[in-house]
Every structure is written in C-alpha cells, then in structure tokens.
Image: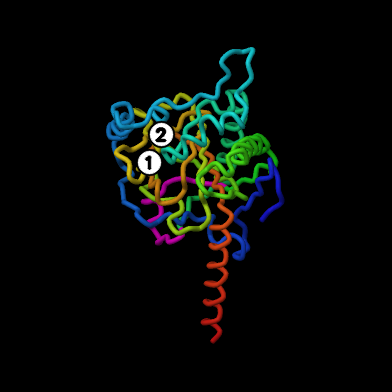
Amino acid sequence: MAEHRAEHIPEEGPSSSRNDTDGLEKDPGMERVEHRSSSTSRHGAGSAASVCAGNSALPRELRKPHSNRPKSKERKRPNAHRLVLQYIAPCMNSYGLCIVDNFLGDKLGDRILQEVRRVHMDGSMQDGQLACQTLGQTKAIRGDKIAWVEGIETGCHNIGALLARIDKLITFADGKLGSYKIRGRHKAMVACYPGNGAGYVKHVDNPNADGRCVTCIYYLNKNWNAKEHGGVLRIFPEGKSYVADIEPLFDRLLLFWSDRRNPHEVQPSFATRYAITVWYFDSEERAEAKKRFRDSTASSESSTTS
C-alpha cells in the first residue's frame, strides 16, 4: 500500500507491477453485463432521466438529495463528521447509495473542472478498458476516455483537494458503513464521455470480491439537462422496487456499495460529461483478493515452466 495521506487513508493505484494491483486499472465488472446500443435517441435518454420524478417508491433521501451548501453566507459549510453521522452513514446503510449536492462549492468545483479539462485536452486520456475485453467490442460496452490521477501531479492539486475531502468523509465513516474496515483506496479515475452517444452498459464495479467496497463519484457538469444531454447513471439496487437515476450535476458527490448490490449503467451522453471516481477498499477482502492473485500467478508461472 502506498504511503498514508489525507486523513490516514492510504492510496493504492494502478502501476506496472502485477504484484500489487491485480488489474484494477481495467474494469472487472463484466459479469451481468447487458448490452445496450450507444445510438439511443435523445428522446429515449430524456425519458429515462425522468423516471425518478414519477417513482413514488424511491426514498425521499434519493428523490431530494442532501445539499452541503451553507444555509447563509455567515455560516460555514457543514463539517464532514456531522455530514457522515447525520446523513451519509444512515443513507448508505438504508439504501446502499447516497447523494450529496453542493459538496465543495462553486469556487473549488470550478478549479477542479479546469484541471479535468486540461487532462482531457492534453491527450492524457485513453479509452476505458475491460478486464475481459474482446478486440473491437470494448467501445460497444463502454465509450469513456479515462486517466488515472493521484492528485499530486503538476496542475492537479485541486483534484488532490477533492480526494482529500472524500478521504476525510470515508475516515469518519469507517466502522459505520456496514461491517467494512476501510484502509485504502485506488487512484482517482478521471473520465470523459465525449458526447457522441457514448455510455457504459449495465455492470457491477466489483463482482468478484476484489476488495472494493465503496464507489465515490464526483460530477463536474454545469447546466446539465438530462432530457437533452442524457448521461444519467441508472442504479438498479438489488432487492428494491425502484431504480435510482442520478443526473451527473456539477458539484454532486455520489456514494454507493461497489459490489453486486448495485448494478448500474451510464446512459448515452450527448454532451461532454466529466466525472472523477474513487474506489475504497475493505482491508480483509482486499488482502484475500491479493492472495488469490498471487496464488493464481504462481500457479500459472509454474505450469508454464513445467
């Protein structure tokens, strides 16, 4: 694991070493994938985005997300500890997902957006990958472009500030999110859907117990209109009578369980759509996943040389 930083949440990111990443730079969520055409019409995307408003089964906390905006200019933004205790932990444990609007405020959100745009424009992004990809099929499954960012790179310190804020939330939430013991996270995945109807078919982030327990996504899209732009993240919570349609609105933070409880899809986007995703690890499941990977690698190497 990497050195501790930001409220004692250590960072663990993709690298060239197979011994400590076991392929997480590629999305392993290929089980339960349902293929979906990237040519969905704008009308279809708008119809999907409107489901929440008419879904009476959707809990109030998901229909009307919590706002982290100060109640007045004289007041400060609610502190992270209170936000976790009063909203995030109860919402996650009840529904498996949680939405926080106005998470950082316009000023810091704007600076993060500028950095993400620079990452996009300077050619640092590559096509999103799949762990079990087949040549020529990846773009039919996911159409995003991504870059892995630590937040300490030149020109990325505001992204680093975002990661520190999320780390702080997760530190306070540790021990309050189910039975998880969260001890580390992945590098941040900065993603762009280029607005050509690209999306990501229904999938699970962690279908195979790779250690990821909480997915956090921060959205950066100003003046987003789902009826026109599409790009809704639709979550299908396991065992629930509703789906949750999350519009990728500027300064919105979304958290949800990473495992099979939350299959989800990104519906086709017809405008440039930016998001930053971070996955946090449960220490016990992550250790077991690393052991399986080492054993599998050793077995493979042994059979090759025998």
Q: Which mark is residue 235?
A: 1
Q: Report the front residue among 230 and 216.
A: 216
Residue type indicated by callout 1 = Ile
Instruction: Give the residue at x 63% y 63%.
Output: 17
Residue at the spot of label 2:
246
Residue 201 % position (x, y): 36, 48
Determine the secondary structure under disc 2: strand
Residue 141 on the magenta segment: yes
Circles 1 and 2: CB distance less than 8 Å? yes
Residue 123 % position (x, y): 57, 45
Whether residue 186 is situated above or below residue 290 in the rendered picture: above
Instruction: Give the residue at x 48% y 50%.
Output: 127
Whether residue 51 is situated above or below residue 96 in the rendered picture: above
Residue type indicated by callout 2 = Ile
Residue 153 left/right relative to 271: right
Instruction: Give the residue at x 43% y 41%.
Output: 96
* Residue furthest bottom as drawn: 306
Determine the secondary structure under disc 1: strand
Residue 211 % position (x, y): 53, 55
> What segment carries the magenta color?
131-147
Q: Could you give the CA–CA distance between mark 1 and mark 2, rounded to whole angstroms? A: 8 Å
Residue 223 left/right relative to 70: left
Residue 66 % position (x, y): 48, 26
Neighbour tally class for label 2: few under 14, some 14-19, many 20 plus, Cα within 10 Å: many
Q: Report the front residue among 11 and 109.
A: 11
Residue 157 on the magenta segment: no
